[in-house]
Image (cartoon, grey):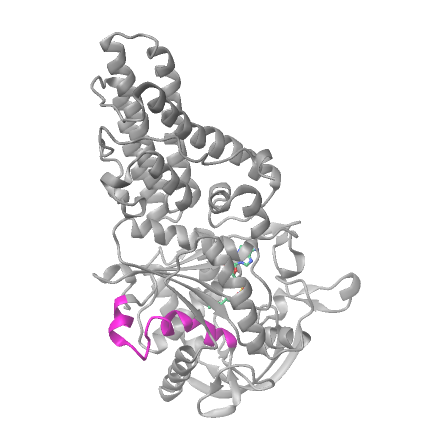
């Protein structure tokens, strides 16, 4: 049986996003998966693991070719422009820390794709045949008749792709085929032995049912257009764009060019994918790897769709809202936080300004931001900005310490292991609520009025407890909101003593008493400005 990522000792924790089609600029849906991957990899970095985070663009195939033609430029010119002017800048804007960005038009990819396919051919896994069937250019996929929808209105009398709700095209071609049908039993065995391989459960069930029905061989070349990687033994054909695209996960980490690096990184621990492209990743990709004797990924994690009007958000039915419009209003960190917080990962969800505004105001501004500013203000007012010692800790403080330990465990399990971002973030915000409750009960502003040494010791203890709690929140929320955590870290005066927030370990976050007595606490920038002040 092929080894999974987690079985290999010093290997990097390797996470990928799908490589996106560059027929247009990125939208909220693409950003959703990419932010999720960024949070996951930042989390693992803060666990102290070696991590590799890959994203990139899928630039071959008919869809890109037609878009470029419609715009009167060559496909490569089109891709160059979009990658440089739209895709890379958005990832930078959203603070995505990918380690590499692969484009399928790069030589480091195309040459290795040819080698991989040649190897399969040499092994007798590929044969020549003919095919006729309905094809959706939006999906770049042959469809089965059973899944097509009847067109209505402008599409009356035509058959539609169930994902794009646009007419399919009938294709008839001489193609090369991969013997996918032979891999059904081996795939089922793998799903059985690795129940964690496909996530969530609903996605796993869908794939298992699909494979149980029997797989057909897969057409892996196209011969009616030429925007792709040429089939090595027959240059009238280009390699099917999905075979080309899936191989990015191998070519980007040294497949066929840097064996040592390849072994340190491959296979991926997690392939993040939208549920629309689950089968490619959970069926075709592992079969390709099996056919070439390569190890299988640890997990295919399918995220749900961001919906608009009951349909998957896509180029043709955009909300009209770009990621940049939202970040302009709410800020980059709140944007990164919102979609992961509001939608259970794996489920569909929709965006609304009202929901975003309400959550921003209640959880970010009122609960978290206010806590940070109140604590800094009180340390300033009562102790001249120097963090006092907690000399009089009692039961109330112990409850906070315990609450933190629970939050760390839960957040680490949910985000780091289960990819339950919403649950993990909620665990930290429950702790924020607990600390707010603690302050309300202890009422340091009242204690401050009493000048007795006992009262002053209590006051110091309360403020130390709150500040130390914030230290832990900054660490735990850094993967989600790095800029905010940096600001809070500065305001707590933590860096000179503890080093940068991004270098703090998740596993160490609950260790109480790290913020040193005497740290300089300042009332820094407002973490989450009121929304009405922003526009
Ligand atoms: N190029 C292929 C993927 C090849 S991977 C080897 C592709 N590209 S895509 O541009 O269509 O992007 C697909 C991915 O973008 C989805 O799988 C998903 O991760 C993300 N999303 C695109 N629209 C989305 C939503 N409306 N909602 C959530 N995610 C979405 O398919």
Q: Residue at x 27, y 44 (%)?
A: 504
- Asked if residue 248 is among those painted magenta in the image, a careful observer would answer yes
Main SS class of the magenta portion in the image: helix
- Image spot of residue 113 (x, y percent): 41, 80
Look at the image and say whether residue 96 sits in the magenta stretch. Answer: no
Residue 476 occupies which quadrant of the picture? top left
Question: Which quadrant of the rendered structure holds the N terminus?
Answer: bottom left
For the C terminus, give its image quadrant.
Answer: top right
Between 11 and 6, the residue placed more toward the observer is 11
Q: Residue 97's spot in the image, x, y percent?
A: 39, 57
Residue at image point 31% right, 68% down: 266
**Total label count?**
0
Judged left or right of residue 468, residue 175 is right
Which percent across, then down, holds residue 15? 37, 60
Q: Nearer the viewer, residue 11 or 505?
A: 505
What span is in magenta? 241-264
Seen in the image, is 50 located left or right of residue 315?
Answer: left
Q: Of 394 and 446, which appears nearest the observer?
A: 446
Asked whether the viewer can see residue 434, the reply is no
State the residue in front, 485 or 424.
485
Residue shown at the point (57%, 76%) measured from the top left: 77
In the displayed structure, 232 sits above or below 353; it is below
Q: Is residue 268 above or below residue 239?
A: above
Q: Is residue 25 left or right of residue 431?
A: right
Q: Is residue 389 left or right of residue 122?
A: left
Q: Residue at x 27, y 22 (%)?
A: 397
């Amino acid at each position: 049986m092929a080894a999974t990522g987690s079985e290999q000792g010093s290997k990097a924790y390797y996470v990928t996003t799908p490589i996106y089609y560059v027929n247009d600029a990125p939208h909220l849906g693409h950003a959703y998966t990419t932010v999720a991957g960024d949070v996951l990899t930042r989390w693992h970095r803060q666990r102290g693991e070696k991590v590799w985070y890959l994203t990139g663009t899928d630039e071959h195939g008919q869809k890109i070719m037609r878009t470029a033609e419609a715009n009167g430029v060559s496909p490569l010119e089109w891709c160059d422009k979009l990658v440089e002017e739209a895709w890379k800048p958005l990832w930078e804007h959203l603070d995505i820390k990918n380690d590499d960005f692969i484009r399928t038009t790069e030589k480091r990819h195309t040459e290795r794709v040819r080698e991989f396919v040649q190897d399969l051919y040499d092994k007798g896994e590929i044969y020549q045949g003919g095919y006729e069937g309905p094809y959706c250019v939006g999906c770049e996929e042959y469809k089965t008749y059973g899944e097509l929808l009847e067109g209505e209105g402008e599409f009356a009398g035509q058959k539609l792709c169930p994902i794009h709700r646009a007419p399919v095209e009938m294709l008839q071609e001489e193609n090369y085929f991969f013997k996918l049908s032979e891999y059904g039993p081996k795939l089922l065995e793998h799903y059985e032995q690795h129940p964690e391989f496909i996530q969530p459960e609903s996605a796993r069930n869908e794939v298992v049912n699909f494979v149980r029905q029997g797989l057909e061989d897969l057409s892996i070349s196209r011969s009616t257009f030429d925007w792709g990687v040429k089939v090595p033994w027959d240059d009238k054909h280009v390699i099917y764009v999905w075979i080309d695209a899936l191989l990015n996960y191998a070519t980007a980490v040294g497949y066929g060019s840097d064996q040592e690096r390849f072994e340190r990184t491959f296979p991926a621990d997690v392939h993040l994918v939208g549920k629309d492209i689950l089968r490619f990743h959970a069926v075709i990709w592992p079969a390709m790897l099996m056919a070439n004797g390569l190890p299988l990924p640890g997990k295919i994690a399918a995220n749900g769709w961001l919906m608009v009007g009951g349909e998957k958000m896509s180029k043709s039915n955009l909300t009209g809202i770009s990621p940049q419009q939202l970040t302009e209003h709410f800020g980059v960190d709140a944007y990164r936080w919102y979609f992961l917080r509001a939608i259970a990962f794996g489920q569909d969800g929709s965006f609304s300004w009202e929901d975003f505004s309400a959550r921003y105001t209640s959880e970010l501004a009122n609960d978290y931001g206010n806590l940070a500013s109140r604590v800094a203000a009180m340390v300033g007012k009562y102790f001249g900005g120097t963090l006092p010692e907690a000399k009089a800790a009692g039961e109330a403080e112990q409850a906070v310490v315990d609450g933190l330990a629970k939050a760390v465990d839960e957040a680490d399990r949910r985000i780091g292991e289960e990819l339950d971002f919403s649950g993990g973030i909620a665990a930290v915000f429950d702790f924020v609520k607990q600390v707010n409750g603690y302050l309300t009960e202890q009422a340091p502003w009242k204690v401050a009025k009493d000048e007795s040494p006992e009262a002053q010791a209590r006051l110091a203890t309360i403020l130390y407890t709150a500040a130390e709690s914030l230290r832990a929140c900054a660490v735990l929320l850094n993967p989600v909101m790095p800029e905010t955590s940096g600001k809070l870290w500065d305001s707590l005066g933590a860096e000179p003593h503890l080093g940068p927030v991004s270098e703090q370990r998740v596993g160490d976050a609950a260790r109480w008493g790290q913020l040193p007595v005497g740290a300089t606490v300042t009332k820094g920038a407002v973490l989450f400005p009121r929304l009405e002040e922003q526009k």
